[in-house]
Amino acid sequence: MNTLASSNLVKSLENYALETANSQPIYALISVHGDPTAEIGKEGAGGQNVYVRELGLALAKRGCQVDMFTRREHPNQEEIVELAPGCRTIRLNAGPAEFISRNNLFEYLPEFVEAWLNFQQRTGCNYALIHTNYWLSAWVGLEIKSRLGLPQVHTYHSIGAVKYGNVENPPPIAAIRHCVERAILEQADYVISTSPQEAEDLRQLISQHGRIKVIPCGINTEHFGSVSKEVARQQLGIAPDSQIVLYVGRFDPRKGVETLVKACANLPSAFQLYLVGGSREDGADFQEQLRIQALVNELGLEAVTVFTGRISQALLPAYYAAGDICVVPSYYEPFGLVAIEAMAAGTPVIASNVGGLQHTVVHGETGLLVPPRDSTALATIC
Ligand code: UDP
């Protein structure tokens, strides 16, 4: 995380922990459903996994000790993984050791809290601060805070009231989520909002109370800017004169891949559409990918569309650099790491005019914005 924005987050947490701790602080980052060491592209893995891992690594690089807690999703997973000196991922047992979608995880949270407290007592780690990620971890953090009185900082990653705002039949868990999202805003020492839009949504839809700091996400700009277009295309076997439209991300209906595919069906000149991401395990991401594949076939785009599957962070810079444009067609996006990763690679970005994207993509300056769900407008601008 080399950008100014993310070093602000690192400094902010550091200062806060130093204010409240007597000696060298140990930070507990909690991400119940987003294992920071998971392969991105596993079912449900995405920006949160990257955010937590990079934050942990950045704090450790500054000499801090960081434990990143997550839920064990497989019996063979190690309990403790040392990612870097001072930075560990710790997998706690809470519910069956298998993938459980985030909508079904709430019932296992009390077990997660007990496992966390056991770990803390067993190891004698004196945590100075807990930083929680997503509403499930917020609940865990509030429980720990109420028992141990630790300061808590929270990042939402997504707000239920925005996500389900226009959804006719939200899942039953949406009501509980809303209560937890209000409690965390009102009771955390402060919450981090990754964009001014998210801060506004929190005030309008969640609560007038509580402290919010706007700290945008950062990325490793050197990593994403490390490959030239020529080298990238050679590496990926893409002809120098091809026109490449790129999408990178999870397959989730709110990502708007459908709008992008429909827009591509209206493009006048030759192009190739690279859809980077997806999951091989059966689950919501995989089902959405199958739906998009069916749409691609229906629109006669199969010959020009490449589904790459999940690409590791190590190989992603080549994909970004190979693209002529990177489209982020989301219907809702709290921040949108993909947009700034593409920018770091020097690839022009076209993004929906929503959420955090409205702040990172300055229309006509750092990219172009289009209305969400509007494939005609997107086709015109592409
Ligand atoms: N990503 C990845 N491999 C893929 C697709 C995506 O590593 O095949 C990463 C991408 O680099 C980015 C993250 O997944 O860091 C997606 O984050 P974003 O904020 O755009 O979306 P979210 O998943 O949080 O909704």
Image (cartoon, rainbow, N blue to C red):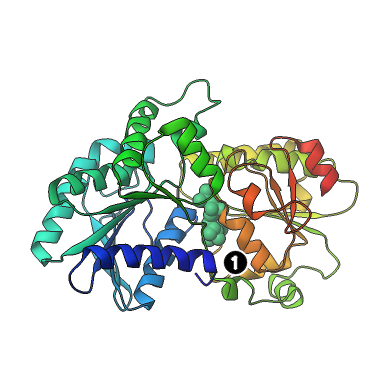
Q: Where 345 falls versus 382 (above or below)?
A: below
Count the numbered circles shown: 1
Instruction: Report x, y in % for residue 375.
Output: 76, 37
Return the residue found at the far right.
Answer: 268
Which residue is nearer to you in this view: 241 or 337?
Answer: 337
Q: Quadrant of ligand 1?
A: bottom right
Residue drawn at (43%, 57%), measured in percent from left and top? 49
Nearest to the observer: residue 104 or residue 306: 104
- Position of 118 with respect to 182 (left or right) is left
Q: Position of 319 compared to 271: left or right?
A: left
Q: Amino acid at mark 1?
A: Leu
**Circle 1 residues within 10 Å: few <14, some 14–19, many ≥20:** many
Q: Position of residue 369 (x, y in %)?
A: 73, 47
Q: Is residue 42 above or below residue 313?
A: above
Q: Which residue is mark 1?
A: 316
Q: Is mark 1 within 8 Å of ligand 1?
A: yes
State the residue in front, 255 or 75.
255
Q: Is residue 322 above or below residue 364?
A: below
Q: Nearer the viewer, residue 235 or 120?
A: 120
Q: Give residue 166's position: percent from left, percent from top.
A: 56, 25
The answer to whether residue 117 shows anywhere in this view is: yes
Residue lying at 58% horizontally and 48% vertically, measured from the top left? 356
Residue at 37 percent of width and 71 percent of height: 59
Report helix, strand or loop for mark 1. helix
The picture places residue 265, in percent across and down from the top left corner, at 81, 41
Is residue 28 toward the left or the right of residue 277 in the image? left
Residue at the image point whose x is 64% and y is 40% from the top: 256
In the image, residue 323 sits, relative to residue 183, either above or below, namely below
- Asked if residue 293 can be seen in this view, the reply is no
Quarter residue 324 falls in: bottom right
Quadrant of the rendered image containing residue 337 = bottom right
With 22 as the anchor, is 8 left or right in this view?
right
